[in-house]
């Protein structure tokens, strides 16, 4: 094994270590799905609020046009 191969091997090992450490600290997805636990800091909160407003608008339109 020459010096170039050793350097590449060390770099790959370092990348694997950093990736594993990140997964241990943060998990695969830090979102638990319980929105009441995160509050407004949740990365999905704006999307959820946007969807709720859209659903409310559609319900109002259906009610206004008497569509069931």
Image (cartoon, helix red, strand yellow):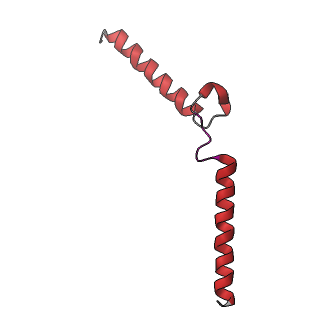
Quarter that holds the C terminus = top left
Q: Is 48 placed above or below 12 here?
A: above
Residue at the farthest bottom position: 2
Identified at 39% across, 20% down, the residue is 58
Magenta extent? 27-32
Spot occupied by residue 3 in the image (x, y as percentages of width and height): 69, 88
Depth check: give the residue in front, 19 or 43: 19
How many numbered circles are shown?
0
Instruction: State whether the magenta stretch is mostly helix, strand or loop.
Output: loop
Left or right of 63 in this view: 5: right
Quarter where residue 55 is shown: top left
Picture quadrant of residue 8: bottom right
Q: Is residue 60 left or right of residue 66?
A: right
- As for residue 63 lying within the magenta part, the answer is no
In front of the other: 14 or 66 = 14
Please state the horizontal and vertical placement of residue 47, each as a whole percent of the image.
Answer: 53, 33
Residue 52: horizontal and vertical position, in percent? 49, 23
Examine the rendered structure and indicate whether residue 14 appears above or below residue 49.
below
- Residue at the (62%, 41%) spot, across then down: 30
Above/below status of 30 relative to 59: below
Q: Residue at x 57, y 35 (%)?
A: 44
Q: Say which quadrant the N terminus sits in.
A: bottom right
């Amino acid at each position: 094994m020459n010096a170039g191969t050793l350097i590449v091997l060390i770099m790959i090992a370092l990348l694997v270590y950093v990736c594993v450490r990140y997964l241990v600290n943060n998990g695969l997805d830090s979102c638990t799905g319980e929105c009441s636990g995160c509050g407004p800091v949740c990365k999905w909160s704006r999307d959820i609020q946007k969807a709720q407003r859209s659903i409310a608008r559609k319900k109002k339109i259906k009610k206004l046009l008497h569509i069931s």
